[in-house]
């Protein structure tokens, strides 16, 4: 974790959103999400550490020609609990990519005696992201045996996932299912309006369940049933205005109320805060 960046909690974000200008936004529903329920792993090895390059500042090491062979991380990986409470979502996935994911997962499970264990999970995420993570040296490496798909990867609690998703193309309510009945596969996020704003400057978001995300630059915050944060380069893939317009225009300007991280922190001490021009 980059200790030089300030930390904001979901509670701080909610309090700030209640007292400052936000904008109504809606999810973009052009692609789906491939979801992997993470089982309880009683192997004594703690959480999964998944490389997520959108959350990492990297020093690129020289390789052969223009190919990147490895990178030393200056931040932290995506940390996924292995107590059975979470799913991992690979975002913005097409039908064809979802089919490739499913075939890949089936092959890996066969190679691991049908078990969704730590090895099969790590093998799967390396193949679909094209990168591996070494927690000892905090290094990511390119994986040669990959299917060339590099979707945004993040984890989410199963209960929240069930409230906010349904199988792709099928309006099926998942809330009545037990956690053990959630299967790996292709899902849609249920589109519902939420409130959005942006935080400029680097910061670390500490989620309600204790996990952390690092944002070295400006990020969008959405507040609905729960808080989530979106990297700048993923905003248009995830949300739009209620009229369907892009939230980040062609010049890179974010069309959301935007507050510097310092104002979020000052608001904790009841200091006034106003949007700034971007």
Image: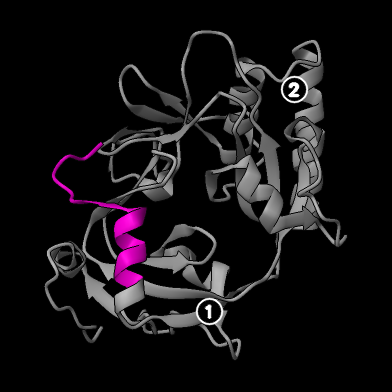
Q: Which label's residue is closer to the chain start, 2 or 1?
A: 1
The residue depicted at 55 percent of the width and 24 percent of the height is 82
Q: Position of residue 164 (x, y in %)?
A: 67, 57
Q: Position of residue 104 (x, y in %)?
A: 76, 32
Per the image, is 135 magenta? no
Query: Which region of the structure is painted magenta?
Result: 1-17
Q: Residues within 10 Å of mark 2 (few under 14, many from 20)?
A: many
172 left or right, relative to 127: right
Up/down of 277 relative to 12, above or below: below
Q: Nearer the viewer, residue 63 or 17?
A: 17
Q: Residue at x 75, y 22 (%)?
A: 108
* Vertical comparison of 274 with 221: above or below: below
Count the marks: 2
- The residue tagged 2 is 108
Q: Quadrant of the N terminus?
A: top left
Rendered residue at 57%/30% (across/down): 126
Tell me the SS state at disc 1.
strand
Q: Label 1, on which residue?
A: 25
Which quarter shows the C terminus? bottom left
Q: Is residue 93 visible?
A: no
Are circles 2 and 1 on residues that touch, CB within 8 Å? no
Residue density around tag 1, few if under 14, some if 14–19, many if 20 or more, within 10 Å: many
User: Residue 85: image x %, image y %?
Assistant: 59, 32
**Residue 247 shows which numbered tag?**
none
Residue at disc 2, secondary structure: helix
Left or right position of 167 against 218: right
Q: Does the stretch in magenta take in 5? A: yes
In which quadrant of the rendered view does residue 153 lie? top right
Of residues 259 and 95, the one drawn nearer to the viewer in this rendering:
259
Point out residue 205 in the picture as x, y percentages from the top left corner: 32, 51
Outermost residue toward the bottom in this view = 243
């Amino acid at each position: 974790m980059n200790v030089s960046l300030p930390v904001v909690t979901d509670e701080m974000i909610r309090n700030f959103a209640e007292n400052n200008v936000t904008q109504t936004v809606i999810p973009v529903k052009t692609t789906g999400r491939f979801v992997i329920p993470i089982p309880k792993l009683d192997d004594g090895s703690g959480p999964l550490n998944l490389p997520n390059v959108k959350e990492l500042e990297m020093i690129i090491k020289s390789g052969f020609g223009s190919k990147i062979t490895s990178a030393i991380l200056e931040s932290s990986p995506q940390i996924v609990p292995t107590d059975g409470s979470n799913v991992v979502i690979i975002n913005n996935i097409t039908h064809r990519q979802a089919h490739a994911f499913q075939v890949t997962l089936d092959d890996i499970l066969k190679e691991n005696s049908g078990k969704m264990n730590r090895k099969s999970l790590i093998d799967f995420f390396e193949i679909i992201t094209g990168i591996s993570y070494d927690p000892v040296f905090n290094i990511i490496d390119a994986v040669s045996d990959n299917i060339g798909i590099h979707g945004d990867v993040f984890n989410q609690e199963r209960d929240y996932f069930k409230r906010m998703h349904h199988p792709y193309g099928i309006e099926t309510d998942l809330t009545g299912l037990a956690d053990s009945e959630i299967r790996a596969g292709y899902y849609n996020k249920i589109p519902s309006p939420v409130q959005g704003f942006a935080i400029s400057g680097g910061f670390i978001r500490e989620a309600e369940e204790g996990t952390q995300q690092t944002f070295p630059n400006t990020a969008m915050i959405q507040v609905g049933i729960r808080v989530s944060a979106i990297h700048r380069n993923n905003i248009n893939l995830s949300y739009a205005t209620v009229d369907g317009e892009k939230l980040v225009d062609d010049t890179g300007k974010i069309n959301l109320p935007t507050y510097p991280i310092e104002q979020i922190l000052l608001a904790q001490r009841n200091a006034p805060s106003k949007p700034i021009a971007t």
